[in-house]
Image (cartoon, grey):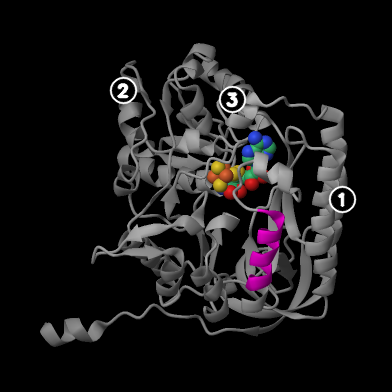
Amino acid sequence: MRTVYIKTYGCQMNEYDSSRLADLLRESHGLLRVPKPDGADVLLINSCSIREKASEKLFSDLGRLHEWKRLRPEVLIGVGGCVASQEGEDIQRRAPYVDLVFGPQTLHEVPALLHAAQRRQAAIDLRFLEIEKFDNLPMPRAEGPRAFLSIMEGCSKYCSFCVVPYTRGNEFSRPFDDVLAEAAVLAGQGVREITLLGQNVNAYQGRRHDGRMADLAELLEYLSCLEGIGRLRFTTSHPLAFGDRLIDAFAHLDKLVGHLHLPVQSGSNDVLERMKRGHTVEEYKAKIARLRLARRDISISTDFIVGFPGETADDFDATMALIDEMRFDLSYSFAYSARPGTPAAALADDVPADVKERRLARLQAVNLTHARHISEAMIGTVQRILIDREAPRGRGDLSGRTENNRVVNFPAAGRTGLVGRFAAVRILEARPNSLRGELLDLEEPSRLRIDYTVTERYS
Ligand code: SAH
Ligand code: F3S
């Protein structure tokens, strides 16, 4: 069978896109996705341009793929994703051996681009087509009990540092019923946990079949009625669009996990204003306080950018003070990197690189300590996990995830049939990247309700 290798960089939306692209190429070209480039007939990179380092990686990777092509000239190389969207034809100028270029919203055109490339014709399509992509992808093929589901594309927030609105276009939401249908297909394939994806996912406004618009809270409500789905997550949210209905969802939807990723970026109001985030530190804290009223033990993780243009030592101290106060769970932090075409790129990138690195290291050390304390406080507690795979180091152990997204490994004597079941485990030990526990109880597998009586009555 002919094979395709897809290397994915960046966000979970890119991961979702890559797996949908693999589903599509299996249908259109009979290409089987393989985990290594060796011997593959088509080599694709789904690129990321969120930070400088991410886009540099593309060109060093392409150099390596070129080596494969030198050995087998019939191999086709393609670049998709956000660097493709941003650099466009310059990619083929810098790397002439690239055969096809596609953007985040022209995935569905890749089969046609492959045909063109095989005939040595121009194969580049970087249009912003909105919904067309989703309408032209086959239904997903689940790989285990957890799945991503993109419910919207793009972002219209235009934070001053961020390239996403330029590479993925403005926000648009998939129709409500399409999302439900995709979720039902996933549930039917054994998926038990769905993570809804979008760059600004809480801005979701999906048209229903009756023409009415539905928000994320309504979508979550419908999805939690779907038989088979035991857990729901969503990411990434923006604090500004986080309304009361969504906060209330945490109070009354049991299937919605008590965990939320809510990027704050900085603890300084001056910096937040220059970032054009549209909210203050106080407003952020007020949202979290309301969330904690709705779900007392909710765990919050976040993103930070350090060294944004004009960030003073006092600004940075304000960020550290916010971290001390909020005690975030496993969070992400990045040194600011100017992205071409964004408003912040016009500001002087005036925090020296070594200062950025020092601040980043301090911030990451404190964040890590808080996350470790949270893990340690879980020792002795009973957690509900979704068992999702065999544990990596053998011995018949299985592995699952808690609501706050921690990996728990536990002895299971090789009972791999338990993958896909929800279970209660007691946490016994906290390790740097995982927890160890013991299995206490298994929930009954939930079944998809299939109504056979209707067909019987009419046959
Ligand atoms: N839509 C999401 C994710 C955006 S990208 C959101 O609202 O947060 C993920 C993270 O990358 C951001 O939260 C931010 O912390 C970081 N990031 C984005 N642009 C950056 C840049 N130019 N330099 C450094 N970090 C950046
Ligand atoms: Fe980027 Fe801000 Fe949107 S970080 S993805 S512009 S919410």
- Where is 353 relative to 96, above or below? below
Nearer to me, 66 or 109? 109
- Residue 282 in which image quadrant: bottom right
If the image is split into quadrants, where does the C terminus sit?
Answer: bottom left
**Numbered circle sitting on residue 340:** 3
Left or right of 286 on screen, residue 22: left
- Residue 114 drawn at (x, y percent): 35, 28
Nearer to me, 234 or 244? 244
Residue 11 shows in the view: no
Reading the image, the residue beneath label 1 is 365
The amino acid type, in three-letter code, at marker 1 is: Ala
If the image is split into quadrants, where does the N terminus sit?
Answer: top left
The amino acid type, in three-letter code, at marker 3 is: Pro
Give the alpha-carbon distance from disc 1 to disc 3, as whole Å.
Answer: 30 Å
Give the alpha-carbon distance from disc 1 to disc 2, as whole Å.
Answer: 50 Å
**Crowding near pointer 1: few (<14 within 10 Å), some, many (20+)?**
few
- Residue 409 drawn at (x, y percent): 73, 67
Residue drawn at point x = 73 percent, y = 54 percent: 331
**Numbered circle sitting on residue 116:** 2
Secondary-structure class at tag 1: helix
Residue drawn at point x = 23 percent, y = 67 percent: 210
Residue 379: say if magenta: no
Secondary-structure class at tag 3: loop
**Earlier along the polypeptide chain: callout 1 or callout 3?**
3
Q: Which residues are magenta?
A: 280-291
Left or right of 164 on screen, residue 332: right
Q: Which corner quadrant of the figure contains ligand 1? A: top right
Instruction: Mark 1 vs mark 3: give the one in front.
Output: 3
